[in-house]
Amino acid sequence: MIEKWCCVKPESIVRVGVVKTATPYFDTLSYIPGSVLRGAVAEWLSMNGREGDIKAFVENVRFGCFTPSSFKSISLPFPMSALECKRHGYFTNVPSGVTPGHGIRDLLLLSTAYFELKRQGVKLPVPLNLRCLREGCGGRLEQASGFYTRTKDGWVKCSVEKTVQTKVALSRHRRGAQEHALYSVVGIKPKGYFTGRIWVKSEEYLELVRVAVEEVGIGSLTTRGFGRVKLSFPSELSLPGVEERVAAFNSKLREVWSSLAELARVSGSRASEEPEYTYFSVDLLSPAIFRERGLPSLKLSLGGEFEPVLWMAQPAFVGGFSTAWGIPKPAELGACMGSVYVFRTKASEEEISPFLRRLEEEGVGERVDEGYGDVLICHPFHCEVMPV
């Protein structure tokens, strides 16, 4: 399939529903799941008398997750291994006009090398001490959350601005306002962009997606002016290929491994100079639904050839609403966006590259056709920022 990066620009308030709670507030997600765009295309086909084309469309197009960006550039969720200073958390290298912080660092490569050496029986003289390295600070590091983008001028955290509109329910019997039936809708202000990936069997589907999404809109309340967007496929949006990312991941891991091995030798413990396996990470760009023996699980399994080494994951409830059926989709327990899994294998980087490309293309877990299980192999963040 052909991978295309896509940019969604909101032109009115966008609301993407979440699992409802017992409050009068109808909240919204801060990102756009792939199922929302898929539903908009299916609705457009149905409106134009092309219901028979929906099956072929679903089989030939897969949507990833679309995350917010302040600029027309690729935005990605922070992996769970990202850490920032509790006192002054932000990137150090930032564009002009943005207040820098003490830096956002990554724990994954260090943790992988640390625990792999420990499994070999290597005795390291010190435990991992997660503290801010800025002179005079020494503050505790905490998990960074949300989204970020990298621009030519520096790094920027990305978020959405939300707004609230209070509405009154209508009585179906009197065809007027229903007394004591106020509710508030939370939506995303039409600012910035959302970027994500689409996989298509043929590029002719791209124009279909663009026309359908712009005519129908995305999310809920589209008949009341919500969800109007413009969609484009900028050629400048791209990431390094899987092979390049895997090579950079292992190169950086060898550097961290060498530093820890030298520290172990100083303390009198024997440690291998370099890792003997090939390593790679699988980072979730959207929530994923895993099962183990029929029960919900946070664990990702790729088969016997790939041995899990380390994983950082948290649970999340996933659900949605089916416009076609007019009923909510089943809510399930899954692994949340940002979860990261590290695997090792005896195979070389070149041998595993086709499998990893297919993994990104097809996704992981269940209900991948709805946008769940969108993954990125060897997230660039692990190699680009300063390690802990």
Image (cartoon, rainbow, N blue to C red):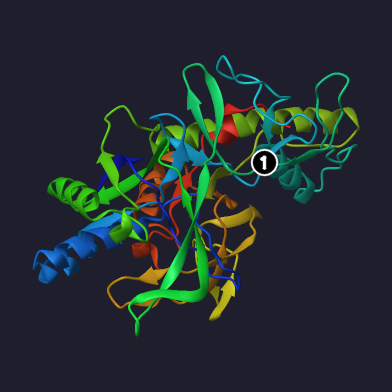
Left or right position of 132 against 12: right
| Residue 382 placement (x, y as % from top left) | 59, 35
Q: Residue at x 55, y 62 (%)?
A: 300
Q: Residue at x 35, y 82 (%)?
A: 174
Q: Which residue is at the far left?
A: 49
Quarter-of-image position of residue 114: top right
Left or right position of 100 against 15: right
Left or right position of 327 against 316: left
* Quadrant location of the C terminus in the rendered image: top right
Q: Nearer the viewer, residue 54 or 45?
A: 45
Q: Residue at x 16, y 68 (%)?
A: 46
Q: Amino acid at mark 1?
A: Ala
Q: Pointer 1: residues within 10 angstroms few (<14), some, or many (20+)?
A: many
Q: Nearer the viewer, residue 201 or 165?
A: 165
Residue indicated by mark 1: 144
Q: Which residue is at the far bottom?
A: 173
Q: Nearer the viewer, residue 212 or 199?
A: 212
Q: Secondary structure at mark 1?
A: loop
| Residue 130 placement (x, y as % from top left) | 81, 37
Q: Residue at x 71, y 46 (%)?
A: 116
| Residue 242 placement (x, y as % from top left) | 41, 39
